[in-house]
């Protein structure tokens, strides 16, 4: 049994999680820290990000917040350098920061609205991966997880830029998996269904009473319940730990 639990241990590893102030990112930071990793919580939201870091480790020795806009290349380069200097290495990157954007049909969406979603969801994932590769090579390998969505596979009749962005980060993980396989850097994507987070609460509040809307949505799920951020974080732990050591491009 201990041998099996050891596969999930992240002792000695350093994980960077974008969009980790709240929602799936915060749950991921908590579970990776519980597995032994030092975690860098990267987000635009300073108050929530600092609170998430303090909840994990009030002494800030193993969890720290950095303000970061993932779509700003100079900021990504600077913050990734600071995290590497602070914690000594980079082993794990979870590209979780994302927005759903305006819920408009394609013919009503402005170029700015389209590009904003692409800049954060796609370019942000590209930039963070770009600046994580060399530090991972330095320590002999690493693991990257891109947060896609079930909509990145099947799409849906709404938020066109979001669905396109989620399909793109899925393919980026497959490309990076092949590009870096011989350097022991794995890349996978995760495809959540309906997960209750600030993002979905905000979207559901536009459709009516939030509890009522979530109750109706749960009927679309075979298990008849909406997922929790922890449900997704557990899968991410598997992918970034040695338990998932032969899983890449998946
Ligand atoms: P959320 O809105 O609750 O959290 C997203 C976090 O990303 C926020 O803290 C936000 O401040 C941060 N962020 C946004 N733009 C940023 C930027 N430019 N730089 C840095 N941080 C930024 O959302 P969530 O539901 O937890 O979603 C997390 C990820 O999971 C997203 O990529 C989302 O697309 C994906 N996802 C969510 C669901 C769901 O049902 N909740 C389903 C499928 C996929």
Image (cartoon, rainbow, N blue to C red):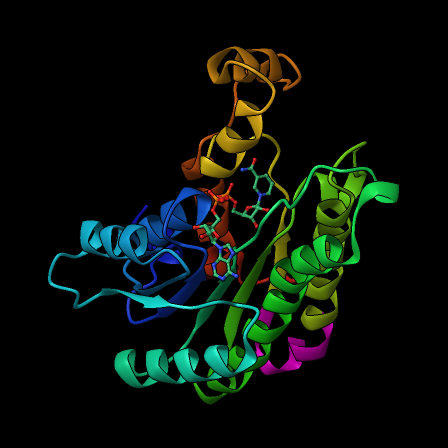
Residue 170 lies, in percent from the top left, at 71, 56
> Does the segment drawn in magenta span residue 183?
yes
Q: In the rendered picture of this protein, how many numbered marks are placed on residues?
A: 0
Q: Is residue 175 left or right of residue 236?
A: right
Percent position (x, y) of residue 71?
57, 69
Q: What residue is shown at x 54% (from left), y 72% (from top)?
A: 128
Task: Choose top left, top right, bottom left or bottom right for residue 139.
Answer: bottom left
Note whether 139 is above or below 203 in the view shown.
below
The location of residue 129, given as percent across then percent down, is 58, 73
Residue extending farthest left: 59
Classify residue 179 by image quadrant.
bottom right
Q: Is residue 250 visible?
A: no
- Residue at image position (88%, 43%) is 107
Magenta stretch: helix, strand or loop mostly: helix
- Residue closest to the eye, 2 or 223: 223
Looking at the image, which residue is at 50% across and 45% down?
Answer: 235
Magenta region includes residue 5? no
Q: Which residues are magenta?
A: 178-186
Compare residues 216 and 208 and report the one nearer the observer: 208
Give the quarter of the figure containing the C terminus. Answer: bottom right
Residue 101 appears in the rendering? yes
- Left or right of 250 on screen, residue 127: left
Q: Is residue 221 left or right of residue 164?
A: left
Q: Horizontal and vertical percent for residue 151?
A: 73, 40
């Amino acid at each position: 049994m201990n041998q099996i639990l050891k596969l999930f241990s992240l002792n000695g590893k350093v994980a960077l999680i974008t969009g980790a102030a709240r929602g799936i990112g915060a749950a991921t930071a908590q579970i990776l820290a519980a597995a032994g990793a030092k975690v860098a919580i990267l987000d635009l939201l300073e108050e929530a990000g600092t609170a998430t870091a303090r909840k994990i480790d009030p002494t800030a020795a193993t969890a720290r917040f950095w303000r970061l806009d993932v779509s700003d290349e100079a900021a990504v380069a600077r913050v990734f350098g600071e995290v590497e200097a602070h914690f000594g290495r980079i082993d794990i990157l979870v590209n979780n920061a994302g927005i759903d954007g305006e819920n408009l049909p394609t013919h009503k969406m402005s170029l700015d609205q389209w590009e904003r979603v692409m800049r954060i969801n796609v370019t942000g994932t590209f930039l963070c991966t770009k600046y994580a590769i060399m530090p991972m090579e330095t320590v002999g390998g690493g693991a990257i997880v891109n947060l896609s969505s079930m909509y990145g596979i099947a799409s849906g009749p709404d938020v066109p830029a979001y669905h396109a962005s989620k399909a793109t980060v899925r393919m980026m993980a497959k490309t990076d998996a092949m590009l870096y396989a011989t350097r022991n850097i794995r890349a996978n994507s995760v495809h959540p269904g309906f997960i209750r987070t600030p993002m979905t609460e905000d979207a559901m509040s536009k459709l009516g009473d939030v509890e009522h809307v979530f109750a109706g949505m749960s009927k679309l799920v075979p298990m008849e319940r909406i997922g929790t951020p922890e449900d997704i974080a557990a899968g991410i732990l598997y992918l970034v730990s040695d338990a998932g050591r032969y899983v890449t491009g998946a």
